Image (cartoon, rainbow, N blue to C red):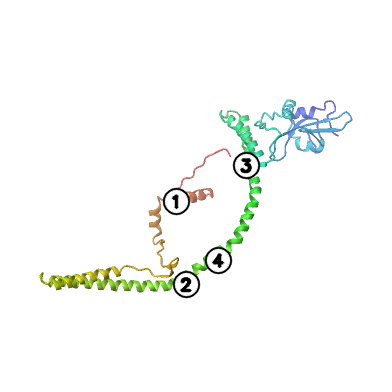
């Protein structure tokens, strides 16, 4: 296997200085490195040649295949001091410190993840008490954000796993009862629709009756007024007749009050009811009238954002660009 003849550390030392020499897959070079699984934390790696000429490697605290470890760590050489610091659990200088929660995590995934988050939160909030002034600090903030997002993603996955049986059970209950909830309601509405024409006709007849009652009441009221005007003040009989006629007119007026058409009996009654809805006859005027409504403004803002993001210019809308950490 390939190795520098005089100095087995030469390749690693040159790489630390920024001069990464030729490298070949499966052909390790002695030195200290770091590697990580996708989305995971950096782990220290040490690769060396033993006295018998065989390659050895340690990733973290476990022995691994040297050739395999080399394939993943060769582009990430680190100093011995950085390796030693990481192997002792103090993390890396260019990354936020690993929250010191140890290995005695609760068995409950929720409690374990909550503990992990609380530890990260404590350190992140302490970090944010001072402004970012260096690239290293900016890098740490970015890595911290990614770690917190990983916690969020893990929480989302765990939440989905824990909730899924309840969702399935809920859907099963919904499916069981759906027919008995929806079908009777649909049939009841069909029955009401079926009886609606009859009730409408009854209502029409009722309106005609009311008009006849009002006409008759008005006729009797005028007759009573005329009789009272013609009768002599001493003619008590005529006065009484006029008063009776006026009372009949009042009763007729009372009878003219609306009686809503209905069917059924108490507790199971169907009657005509008034339902209000809008029909737009002038769209432009309606938009102008409703333009200041909060819901209309929110809708217009949503549509404007959608258009701007799609690269479409809209009259009355200004395109705004701002950069934020993401």
Sooner in the amino-acid sequence: mark 3 or mark 2: 3
Looking at the rendered structure, which numbered label has been put on residue 152? 3
Residue on which the image places disc 4: 183
Sooner in the amino-acid sequence: mark 4 or mark 3: 3
Sooner in the amino-acid sequence: mark 1 or mark 3: 3
Kindly identify the residue that appears in the image at 72 percent across and 39 percent down.
37
> Label 1 neighbourhood size at 10 Å, few (<14), some (14-19), many (20+)?
few
> Label 4 neighbourhood size at 10 Å, few (<14), some (14-19), many (20+)?
few
Closer mark to the observer between disc 4 and disc 3: 4
Q: Secondary structure at mark 3?
A: helix
Between 3 and 114, the one lying in front of the other is 114
In space, the residues marked 2 and 1 are separated at their CA atoms by 37 Å
In space, the residues marked 4 and 1 are separated at their CA atoms by 34 Å
In space, the residues marked 1 and 3 are separated at their CA atoms by 32 Å
> Label 2 neighbourhood size at 10 Å, few (<14), some (14-19), many (20+)?
few
Between 16 and 144, the one lying in front of the other is 144
In space, the residues marked 4 and 2 are separated at their CA atoms by 16 Å
Sooner in the amino-acid sequence: mark 2 or mark 1: 2
Closer mark to the observer between disc 3 and disc 2: 2
Q: Position of residue 209 (x, y in %)?
A: 32, 73
Residue on which the image places disc 1: 295
Closer mark to the observer between disc 4 and disc 1: 4
In space, the residues marked 4 and 3 are separated at their CA atoms by 42 Å
Q: Secondary structure at mark 1?
A: helix
Residue on which the image places disc 2: 194
Between 162 and 155, the one lying in front of the other is 162
């Amino acid at each position: 296997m390939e190795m520098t003849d005089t100095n087995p550390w030469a390749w690693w030392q040159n790489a630390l200085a920024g001069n990464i020499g030729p490298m070949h897959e499966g052909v390790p070079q002695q030195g200290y490195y770091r590697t990580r699984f996708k989305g995971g934390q950096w782990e220290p790696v040490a690769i060396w040649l033993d006295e018998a000429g065989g390659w050895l490697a340690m990733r973290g605290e476990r022995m691994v295949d040297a050739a395999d470890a080399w394939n993943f760590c060769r582009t990430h050489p680190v100093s011995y001091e950085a390796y030693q610091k990481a192997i002792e659990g103090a993390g890396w200088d260019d990354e936020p410190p690993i929250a010191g929660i140890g290995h005695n995590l609760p068995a409950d995934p929720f409690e374990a993840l909550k503990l992990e988050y609380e530890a990260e939160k404590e350190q992140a909030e302490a970090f944010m008490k001072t402004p970012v002034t260096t690239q290293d600090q900016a890098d740490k903030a970015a890595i911290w954000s990614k770690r917190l997002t990983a916690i969020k993603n893990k929480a989302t996955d765990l939440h989905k796993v824990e909730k899924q049986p309840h969702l399935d059970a809920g859907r099963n209950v919904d499916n069981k009862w759906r027919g008995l909830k929806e079908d009777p309601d649909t049939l009841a509405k069909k029955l009401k629709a079926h009886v609606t024409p009859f009730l409408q006709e009854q209502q029409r007849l009722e309106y005609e009756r009311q008009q006849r009652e009002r006409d008759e009441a008005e006729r009797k009221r005028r007759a009573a007024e005329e009789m009272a005007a013609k009768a002599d003040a001493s003619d008590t009989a005529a006065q009484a007749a006029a008063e009776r006629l006026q009372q009949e007119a009042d009763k007729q007026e009372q009878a003219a009050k609306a009686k809503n058409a209905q069917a059924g009996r108490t507790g199971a009654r169907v009657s005509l009811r008034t339902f209000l809805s809008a029909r737009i006859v002038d769209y432009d005027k309606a938009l102008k009238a409703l333009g200041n409504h909060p819901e209309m403004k929110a809708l217009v803002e949503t549509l404007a954002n959608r258009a701007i993001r799609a690269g479409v210019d809209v009259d009355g809308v200004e395109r705004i660009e701002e950069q934020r950490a993401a």
